Amino acid sequence: EMQLVETGGGLIQPGGSLRLSCAASGFTVSSNYMSWVRQAPERGLEWVSIIYEGGSTYYADSVKGRFTISRDNSKNTLYLQMSSLRAEDTAVYFCARVRLGDTVLAYDAFDIWGQGTMVTVSS
Amino acid sequence: DIQMTQSPSSLSASVGDRVTITCRASQSISTYLNWYQQKPGKAPKLLIYAVSSLQSGVPSRFSGSGSGTDFTLTISSLQPEDFATYYCQQSYIIRTFGQGTTVEIK
């Protein structure tokens, strides 16, 4: 069974740093596009960051320069290093696998999700 | 950035009703449009990808249509387990979600 499990959330003061982990099983992180999506309390989904199979990374403007996505192939794990945290970063953070289409049907969708880990930024 | 606008933001419906949710992109996104269902306290679940392709295991009462900038999610006969929030999402340029549509019990 393909599965993602996030860990690392918690309560952190504004300006602090935190690293989230997302351990994958049943598939290889490095062979897939992998992403982070967050959801503030009582709010909608917000895409945060993505790492491509080749290692290219992209970020939402709201976190650019403060968050870093990475992976450890030996541990089959995705990470999100978050720094200079703000109250507005408070959210449940989900990791997700991206499934890609092919030459017949072009698409790019989040098909496997973790259960999420809560990050609360507050003094 | 591509903006995704869903309507309505919420709706009330009864079991057996036909429900339609629309999603508009701020520019053409080809076939890079997906729909997700989320229940409270749970991770989102992929329902439809590439505008109209049903994800494995998703009931056939769910369907998607549209092209270019205007897309629709339809539930042909609403079931009790379908009361949830639905999000559209584009992956043509970076990734963006719509603001969500909550389907509530009438």
Image: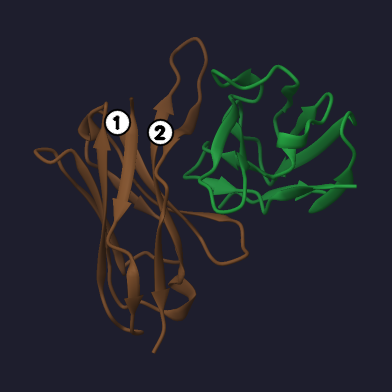
Question: What residue lies at 36% left-to-right and 84% top-to-bottom?
Answer: A14
Tag 1's secondary structure? loop
Whole-percent x and y of residue B1? 55, 53
In this view, the residue farthest toward the front is B80
Whole-percent x and y of residue A6? 32, 51
Observer-nearest of A2 and A37: A2
Indicate whether A10 appears above or below A56: below
Position of A97 with respect to B17 (left or right) is left
Indicate whether A2 appears above or below A39: above
Position of A77 with respect to A63 (left or right) is left
Q: Amino acid at mark 1?
A: Asn
Observer-nearest of A46 and B66: A46
- Chain letter matching colour green: B
Colour treatment of the image: by chain
Whole-percent x and y of residue A104? 50, 9
Q: Amino acid at mark 2?
A: Val
On the same chain, marks 1 and 2? The answer is yes
Tell me the colour chain A is drawn in: brown
Which corner quadrant of the image does residue A32 belong to? top left
Q: Which residue is mark 1?
A: A32
Whole-percent x and y of residue A122? 41, 84
Question: What residue lies at 77% left-to-right and 35% top-to-bottom?
Answer: B80
- Is the C-beta separation of discs 1 and 2 under 8 Å? yes
Q: Which residue is mark 2?
A: A98
Tell me if residue A107 can be seen.
yes
Position of B55 with respect to A31 (left or right) is right
Quarter of the image with the C terminus of chain A in it: bottom left
